Image (cartoon, coloured by chain):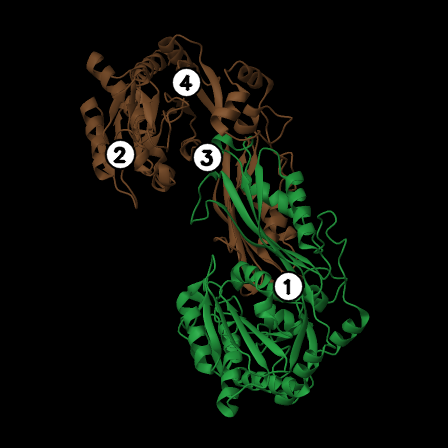
Chain colours: A green, B brown
Amino acid sequence: MRRAAEFVADSLRAAGLENVELIETEGHPLVYADWMHAPGKPTVLCYGHYDVQPPDPLDLWKTPPFEPTIRDGNLFARGSADDKGQMYIHVKAVEALMRTSGSLPVNVKFLVEGEEEIGGKSVAAYVAAHAAKLKADVALVSDTAMYAPGLPTLCVGLRGLVYTEVAMKGASRDLHSGLYGGAAPNPVFALIELLSQAKDAGGRILIPGFYDDVEDAGEVELESWKSLPFNEADFLNKEVGALALTGESEYSVLERVWSRPTLEVHGIAGGFTGAGAKTVIPAEATAKVSFRLAPNQDPDRIVASFRDFVAERTPAGCAAEMRVLSAGPACMVNPDHPAIRVAASAFEETFERETVFVRSGGSIPIVGDFATHLGIPTILMGFGLPDDGLHSPNEKFAVENFYKGIHTVAHFLEKYGEAS
Amino acid sequence: MRRAAEFVADSLRAAGLENVELIETEGHPLVYADWMHAPGKPTVLCYGHYDVQPPDPLDLWKTPPFEPTIRDGNLFARGSADDKGQMYIHVKAVEALMRTSGSLPVNVKFLVEGEEEIGGKSVAAYVAAHAAKLKADVALVSDTAMYAPGLPTLCVGLRGLVYTEVAMKGASRDLHSGLYGGAAPNPVFALIELLSQAKDAGGRILIPGFYDDVEDAGEVELESWKSLPFNEADFLNKEVGALALTGESEYSVLERVWSRPTLEVHGIAGGFTGAGAKTVIPAEATAKVSFRLAPNQDPDRIVASFRDFVAERTPAGCAAEMRVLSAGPACMVNPDHPAIRVAASAFEETFERETVFVRSGGSIPIVGDFATHLGIPTILMGFGLPDDGLHSPNEKFAVENFYKGIHTVAHFLEKYGEAS
């Protein structure tokens, strides 16, 4: 992690940024840098992250996750798209401008973190405590995807995320199911019983009060989504690769993945899971349970509702413990903001197609932190593609998008400087 | 393993048994011996096993697991009770009779295996293929425990066991829950949904037809269980160590663990289960699911019902596969069988207390093999105690029970010969 942070710092220094520093945290270091010699011009805060998801399962990678390999115009590596490759676009855009004109058209600050994939605690605390140092007019984040190859895309909405872990305990030790089965509590089954009550077969979450504050997408936005080149059969067969799509059938697929709240179990573990048969009643089991939040849902309220739900529905004989690993709200950006308009236009000129406004069902907590503590909107200008395989084996990033991304960001900074 | 098998063979030879042989198998050798010079008298087939469970964790043993040590009237060693010590009781009983009278009161065959703790595949195949050689009137197995110290106990019922593995598949790869959550199938949740429908909160199994053939314990047997020194609070607090007992509250605890069928999930695995948060929708999840069977339930029919249940209830978007790892029926011995009556009486005379008839919720597959292939009942005459710590560190066997066991078995053979 430290080598990655130092690589970022060195790259920023080489690009011509100033005041480059590694900021120590309780976790992984933040990297800060700035260039503030454009008086009267706005300040752009470039954010990215140098940490990545674990590469497991390793045996599914065609080439090793940490040996970047180009095949068919794509760079295959863990973090190529999420977010090392995209973050590096900002560095290279600034470097290009510095090398060609010796200065930048706007003031620029960089803040690059190393804990995005594990909750972003350190950067959140730093942003909250250093609003003056980070003061800017707009934040620029490249950590999302274009809607389709060649289609300039700005993301104006993100779902929130509450991520929890539920541990269920039964007997004080593993028991023999022949001797105790039928009378001893089974925490694996207790967890199954509990979680099965949280969502119905139609995808509706059954936790009391869960939908109270949900703000659904408005008619204008829904209408614009209809013009997107979305093909449900392709989404199912080429992206998801399952027998059928699931979830709330009364909402369109884009609403389900972009604007509706969800409950997912990301992992579950307990008891004997090796080859063959072991007749054990395990002493405990755990599950990772998350909620994606719609705009206007309060993460603290969702946490409280789920905590009550777990406490009330824990099956007899077992004890459940719920831990919150992260909690952040949804974030919306106004597409009429001047910086967003300039970004849309720069994007359009590079890719020679009209920019579309979409949402992402993912969560980028930093966007909420920038809104709350710095009072600024965030331009989510992503150059990834829908099939990049983020968090999966064989993650890739299109080499063409890397270069066009550098062009687009540099162009945005120029146009934003001119417009101000 | 071979040294243990040879030790058994040598001991049988020294005891006066004839035709002693090591029978090679695909696994560990079987040991066979017989003494067939009591014409007109019945034949008793003595079964035991010389293999033991691994001794780990070694650091919890007070004295080394393979250096038998006597403390406070107990012999501490791996296998002292399960089953080397108990199997050796049969050898010494026969030796005692041979030394004192030069012959045996009945015909005797020995079959001692070395794979009991790993599935008993070789002995099962051997019994199926050599019914004529193993022909006997009754089998004698000492591999169970007395209900309480000093209380002669015959086990007359064992539950059956169907052990399966259910694999649930969703998308063709792990997906990012931000991008696909709300529309993509989640096999972890699908497995939760499926299994939650298989058993209700009251412990009742909801698979159609599951209880059709269940034969519950009769009134006489239930009445006799009431006389056992069973204390529910001790069972909960000292043995199970959980907040409460669970299961079918309309049945007594002993019925729940001895005679009622069960569904247990022994293990479940899927997705991300490491420390921290990973927002993945995993591509698959698996669970180990078993059923303990009551007398008269047909394992094949239970397998078929569960297979149908899985096929019908698999949630949309997912595909489930059910594999059967083992399937065996419950085994009951008629307590009025002449050999059982003689065994009860011999037990009673040695320990000077009335013999109780109990069941065990576990499964001893060899008992089913003897019933199926040899058509004979099995006397489960165990001399262990409930706190012997089978499969655990500091396994022990009461020295008094070893000597009284020899006396009881010899006495049983004498009385069985006289009664015939």
Q: Is residue A182 left or right of residue B382?
A: right
Amino acid residing under circle 3: Arg
Few, some or many residues within 10 Å of mark 2 (<14, 14–19, 20+) = many
State the residue at coordinates (60%, 67%).
A132
Task: Rate crowding at label 4 as few (under 14), some (14 to 19) or many (20 or more) other CA atoms within 10 Å.
Answer: many
> On what subunit does the disc labeled 1 rest?
A
Q: Where is mark 3, residue-wise? A: A173
Point out the image quarter for the N terminus of chain A: bottom left
Question: Does residue B40 show up?
Answer: no
Label 3 vs label 4: CA separation? Answer: 39 Å
Q: Secondary structure at mark 2?
A: strand
Q: Amino acid at mark 1?
A: His
Residue depicted at x 30% and y 17%: B72
Amino acid carrying label 4: it is: Ala
Q: Chain letter for mark 2, please.
A: B
Could you tell which of marks 3 and 1 lies nearer the N-terminus? 3
- Which residue was labeled with disc 4? B339
Compute the Cα span from label 4 to label 1. Answer: 85 Å
Q: Position of residue A260 (x, y in %)?
A: 71, 62
Q: Disc 2 residue type?
A: Val
Of badges 2 and 1, nearer the viewer stands 1
| B58 w.r.t. A335: above or below | above
Residue under the image location 48 percent in, 89 percent down: A99
Task: Name the residue beneath numbered marker 2.
Answer: B31
The alpha-carbon separation of the residues under discs 4 and 2 comes to 24 Å
- Of badges 4 and 2, nearer the viewer stands 2
Q: Nearer the viewer, residue B412 or B198?
A: B198
- The picture places residue B255, in percent across and down from the top left corner, at 56, 25
> Residues at marks 3 and 4, common chain?
no
Q: In the rendered view, would you say B82 is above or below A404?
A: above
